[in-house]
């Protein structure tokens, strides 16, 4: 438990970050760029001094910190793939934070590689303060500020871990303004609907696929469901038809944000719910083509991001794996922050259990990556009783325990017989069309 003095310290840091959150999105672009470039210089100096990967990379290229003074200069650094971070997380960890209290997160992300991320408390404070921008937009849509929020999430997932870290490091006055409750998403639809009805939240939040499934099934099964002021999703995509059901049939506005474990906040929609406003003071974002060259606004390419506030696990020029397009125009809302026009993020399917219920990929992957030696996995469900699992293991000479654990996990999760699951060890799992990697694919329409 963090002591009162440390809580007071970090609360002061959070308030310092929050002091300009309500005005920064409307600052002149040049002023925002000044903040961004100042943070670029600071994080590059920090990386050169304390992070092995970037110190070696800069020396190999004959670079010193003074060679990188703007966000545009970050392209001088090498691109970093998720597999590099997964293989050697310590090379991206600052020596100053090796034995310091940090937020520990794990993720597979769009790349499909299981990664460990450490976030320093200062970056957590910056992310908490940055949330005020998103909540202002939500309040504008809902015509009132949320007092109660229900989050459907995997037990022990990123959102819950982050919330507990904030509560343990900050004074209650900073974390208690919105009552946030977490409910496990790994339940039948009827149980999820009952949980929503019992709590009657102002805001309902979860993954896009999961929320779409819940409202679609509630309508199909004739289940009465509480109608919050707002539905908020992130982490994956929501099907267009599901969004229409929520907005048109239930009359609930839907808003989305863009984030990842590597970058707690990247962008969010505003009250116009079109493009996504970039947290460009906290993240430097560029879009590249297949050859690694920057593409023009309006063209789709791969998102490459640099975290300007996290000094524990430092990530500069990190390939997020998502396909996005930047917008040359600015939003009609008046915010001057750069705009992401479109995001083609995670779009994994929900696997089908024998009971007829669906299971979200976050539940599946969290269980699978507990298998010893598992590096990467791709699951294809052809039918209830026919599942193909292709896996990459750390050591093929000792793959049997990994194979057995993966098979046992899928038997448990999907309630199928062991012989229905074919587990194959492969050398690599290439990305699909457009460079996207899908860890979960289901061809089952119903039980």
Image (cartoon, rainbow, N blue to C red):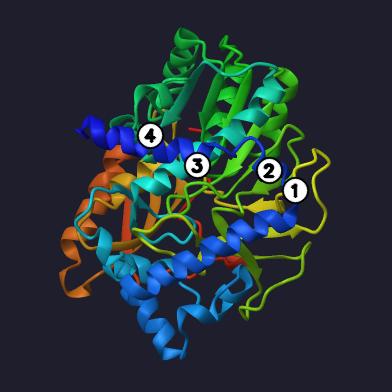
Do the residues under discs 2 and 4 have CB atoms within 8 angstroms? no
Separation (CA) of disc 3 from disc 1: 19 Å
Residue matched to label 4: 11
Separation (CA) of disc 1 from disc 4: 28 Å
Looking at the rendered structure, which numbered label has been put on residue 114?
none
> Where is the N terminus found, in terms of image quarters?
top left
Q: Earlier in the sequence, mark 1 or mark 2?
A: 2
What SS does tag 4 mark?
Answer: helix
Q: Residues within 10 Å of mark 4 (few under 14, many from 20)?
A: many
Do the residues under discs 1 and 2 have CB atoms within 8 angstroms? yes
Which of the 4 image quarters holds residue 139? top right
Looking at the rendered structure, which numbered label has been put on residue 25?
2
In the rendered image, residue 297, in percent from the top left (x then y), is placed at 77, 64
Q: Earlier in the sequence, mark 3 or mark 2?
A: 3
Separation (CA) of disc 2 from disc 4: 22 Å
Q: Residues within 10 Å of mark 3 (few under 14, many from 20)?
A: some
Q: Is residue 192 visible?
A: yes
Residue matched to label 1: 336
Q: Earlier in the sequence, mark 1 or mark 4?
A: 4
């Amino acid at each position: 438990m963090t002591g009162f003095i440390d809580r007071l310290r970090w609360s002061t840091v959070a308030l310092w970050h929050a002091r300009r959150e309500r005005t920064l999105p409307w600052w002149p672009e040049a002023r925002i760029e000044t903040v961004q470039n100042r943070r670029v210089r600071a994080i590059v100096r920090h990386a050169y001094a304390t992070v092995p990967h970037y110190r070696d990379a800069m020396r190999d290229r004959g670079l010193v910190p003074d060679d990188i003074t703007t966000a545009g200069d970050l392209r001088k650094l090498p691109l970093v793939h998720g597999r590099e971070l997964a293989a050697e997380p310590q090379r991206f960890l600052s020596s100053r934070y090796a034995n310091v209290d940090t937020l520990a997160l794990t993720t597979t992300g769009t790349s499909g590689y299981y990664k460990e991320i450490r976030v320093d408390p200062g970056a957590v404070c910056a992310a908490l303060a940055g949330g005020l921008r998103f909540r202002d937009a939500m309040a504008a849509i809902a015509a009132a500020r949320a007092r109660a929020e229900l989050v459907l999430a995997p037990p022990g997932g990123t959102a819950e871990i982050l919330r507990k870290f904030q509560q343990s490091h900050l004074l209650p006055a900073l974390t208690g303004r919105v009552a946030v409750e977490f409910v496990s998403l790994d339940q039948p639809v009827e149980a999820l609907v009952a949980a929503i009805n019992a709590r009657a939240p102002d805001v309902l939040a979860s993954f896009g696929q999961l929320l779409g499934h819940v409202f679609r099934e509630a309508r199909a099964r004739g289940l009465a469901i509480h109608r919050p002021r707002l539905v908020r999703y992130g982490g994956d995509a929501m099907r267009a038809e599901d969004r229409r059901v929520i907005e048109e049939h239930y009359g609930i506005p839907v808003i989305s944000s863009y984030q990842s474990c590597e970058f707690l906040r990247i962008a969010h929609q505003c009250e116009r719910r079109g493009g996504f406003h970039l947290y460009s003071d906290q993240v430097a974002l560029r879009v590249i083509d297949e050859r690694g060259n920057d593409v023009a606004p309006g063209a789709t390419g791969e998102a490459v991001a640099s975290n300007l506030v996290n000094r524990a696990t430092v990530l500069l020029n990190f390939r997020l794996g998502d396909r996005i397009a930047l917008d040359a125009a600015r939003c009609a809302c008046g915010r001057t922050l750069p705009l992401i026009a479109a995001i083609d993020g995670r779009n994994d399917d929900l696997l089908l259990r024998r009971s007829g219920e669906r299971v979200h990929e976050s539940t599946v992957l969290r269980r699978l990556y507990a298998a010893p030696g598992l590096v990467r996995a791709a699951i294809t469900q052809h039918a209830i009783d026919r599942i193909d699992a292709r896996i990459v293991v750390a050591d093929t000479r000792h793959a049997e325990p990994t194979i057995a654990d993966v098979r046992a996990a899928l038997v448990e999760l999907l309630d199928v017989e062991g012989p229905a699951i074919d587990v194959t060890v492969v050398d690599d799992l290439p990305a699909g069309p457009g460079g996207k990697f899908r860890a979960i694919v289901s061809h089952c329409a119903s039980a």
